Image (cartoon, coloured by chain):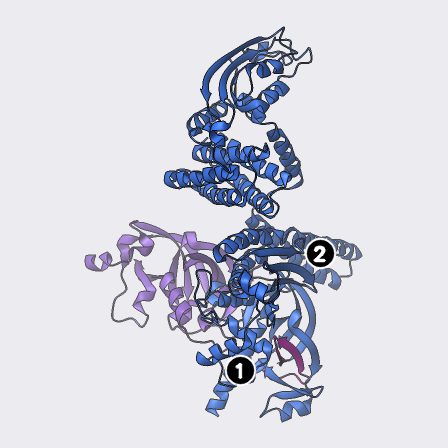
Chain colours: A purple, B blue
Amino acid sequence: MTQAARKISEEIWGGREDLEVLTFDIAGEMFALEAFIVQEILDLLPETVVPGAKAFVGSVINFRGKVIPLADIRLAFGMDATRTTIDSRIIVIVIDIDGEPVLTGIRTDKVHEVTTLMRAAGEAPPSVGMRWRPDFIDCLVKRGSEFIIVPNLQAIFTAQHDHGVTAHNHG
Amino acid sequence: MSFPDPIAVFRTEAAELLEQIEAGLLDLNVNLGDKDQVDAVFRGLHTLKGSGAMFGFEALAAFTHHCETAFDRVRKGEVPATQALVTAVLEAKDHMRALVETPTGDFEARSEYLLANLRQAVEGADGSGATAAAGPALTLYKIRFSLPQNAMANGTNPLPLLDELAELGECRIVADRSRIPSLDQLFPTDLHLSWDVELLTAEPRSAIEDVFIFVMDEMELDIQEKAVAPAAAPVAPAPAPVASQMQQPAEAPVVARPAMAPASPTAPAANDAKSAKASENVRVPAERLDELMDRVGELVIAQSRLSQLAGGSGDLQLRAVSEDVERLSGELRDTMMVLRMVPVAQLFGRFRRLVHDLAIETGKTIELVTEGETTEVDKSVIERLADPLVHLVRNSCDHGLEPPEERVAAGKGAAGHISLSARQQAGEVIITIKDDGRGINKDRVRAKAEASGLIPANASLTDQELYQLIFQPGFSTAQTVTNLSGRGVGMDVVKRTIDALRGTINVASHPGLGSEISLAIPLTLAIIDGLLVRVGAGRYVIPLSAVEECLELSVEEDMRSRGRSFISLRDSLVPFIRLRDLFRTGTKPDQFQKVVVISTGSERVGLVVDQIIGDHQTVIKGMSKLHHDVTTFSGATILGDGDVALILDVGHLVAEGQQQEAHLRAAG
């Protein structure tokens, strides 16, 4: 365990022992994002499909007069599409791409709460027994009987940014 | 003096002053006898020195002082203005910029070198270099005077006295505040100040006494002669006392104005002119304008939602309010657009210096003519145009214009001409760079393009197509690579930038007579006139500037064109692209599809859409970085109902369509 904990990437924790995060559900898994990168939580908005864009960022939305991409984390983790419900939300975050802050939305099934994760409860992603790309996950944090996934957004967005699958648009 | 704000203000001001100085110098270079420009340059240098010292830029103040002194001598007619002097001061000006930007940098050596240059230029102008010794001897006077307490009540104003003293020579004035009483005892019309003045002048002692002739009886005046220095002194070792003296006024903020301003009679005039200007103009950071623009864009969107609501309701009062808001937001948007416009003079100004330097570098005589400087263009466009224009102007100077001998042999004047002009034309600004040089050698362009495999041998190309080849990366017809150009980089930068600005390049050339390159750029990057169309469920905007006409795709044409995608339009064949296929909408085509015929440079292409909704003027939003790989769209816009519509990048769209067809052909 200690060995695993040591492997937790320093990128997010940066030597801190706890992390304030926003937790949310995507396709039945609970994820957490560092709270300070979250700009806003929105109800679902009309989406505009961008033909030719990668499926991961296949559409754009109007966020207060700004046109921002809407990313679908499920595609990075190969998860099944879920139906939108009354709980579906868009989380608007700022990420750093090539040294520039970029606003983007993330589609989620349900947003829970802002909470504090303890580094001590965190583990680096296991190298086996997981169908997700390990480099897309910063760490897994145990809470009660379940795990919260702290995704490595930098890796996810950079990967999608460099090479991804072209979207096949639907309707 | 450690507050960041005043320093930043000084830097902005200094940048402006340096620009003024440069413009003045360049004007002077054209007409060396122009007294007004000499004065303008002197004033600029003087103000720069003064405010530099005030804000603690001592190296700058000391350095500028020498240039000022040189110009002062020109102003007084002691030495004539020469091109050597102008060039030396231009170089010095660049150095001043460095001193402004990094006041703590180690510039000693460079300063020394430039000052030596300057001295040489000034002495060269004298013809003999003997003036240094021949000038009248200077005397340093220490003057201390105080006026009676009731002097101001009796109508004596000390400021003109200080001004007069300053007119006599190099003058440092420090006010003595020691006798100012505490506030409760201060009587505002009483004079409590006395002054210490250090005056370096060639005038006799009597001249100083003359200044005080009308108040002599009642005042205390003490004049001491300190040291005697030759006339050349201020040009060489003066900086130390100047710098140290200049600091004192800064330490006495209360009297900063009387102490600083009268240092020269021209200074108050310059200050007045500037404060008058300041009251008319407000300096605003560009980001704030952009923010405001965003807000206005949002307002326009909110307003159109309001109109929709109002239109749907029967409430007449609501409709009246909605109409008012609509009018107001429309006006606000128009005003906003104007706010962002700046005259191209800002841009053209930089090229005078460039051409001046290039002329020296190439040994050619080049005259730059600029026209239409008042044409206004969006600020962001101006900034992005600077680079491509530098390349074009360099190219004209280096390749276009012939050396003087060659020009004379060809029956032209020895001086080459380059003209930069700007004009507005139907929502676009046209910037033309024209030279009267040798023109573009078509044969050489063709040979070079064939050699590098850009075009097949003996390909039939129109002149325009041939000229466009010069914008290919790595293309250069210059036989020798010079310092300036010929490496084949540069022209492709021009092409890329202009493409990014949604502009077009047009080249015309007449062998032996010169060439002309026109850049047509949309007036603003922030707003677009577009045609709103629907393809499947998505709505898209086609830039109206590219649209030639719209027509219906008849059912027969549609059926017939399964194998070949051409329609015949007034006896010419126009290929078309089905946007539904390109965007893979997967929807059934509308019964009456429309073709929007667009032109991309030389080509005409039809775009098949499901519905033409109408024209639409809107604020452009850039595409996110995450979508940088999507080239078919140049941006996005927000429609009246809050939805996002993408703006087609016509050039890239056609290229994409061609690629897709090539794939289909290869597959089928």
Which image quadrant is residue B523 in? Answer: bottom right
Q: CA distance from mark 1 to mark 2?
A: 40 Å
Tell me, yes or no, if residue B198 can be seen here. Answer: yes
Q: Residue at x 66, y 11 (%)?
A: B214
Q: Earlier in the sequence, mark 1 or mark 2?
A: 2
**Residue at mark 1 shares a chain with residue at mark 2:** yes
Marker disc for residue B658 = 1
Whether residues under marks 1 and 2 lie with C-beta atoms below 8 angstroms apart, the answer is: no
> Residue B536 versus residue A43: which sits nearer the camera?
B536
* Residue type at numbered disc 1: Gln
- Seen in the picture, residue B284 relative to B639 is either above or below; the reply is above
Q: Position of residue B227 (x, y in %)?
A: 45, 18
Write down the residue under mark 2. Answer: B330
Residue B383 lies left or right of residue B3; in this view the side is right
Tag 1: Cα neighbours inside 10 Å, few (<14), some, or many (≥20)? few
Q: Residue at x 62, y 41 (%)?
A: B33
Residues in magenta? B587-609
Q: Residue at x 41, y 53 (%)?
A: A35
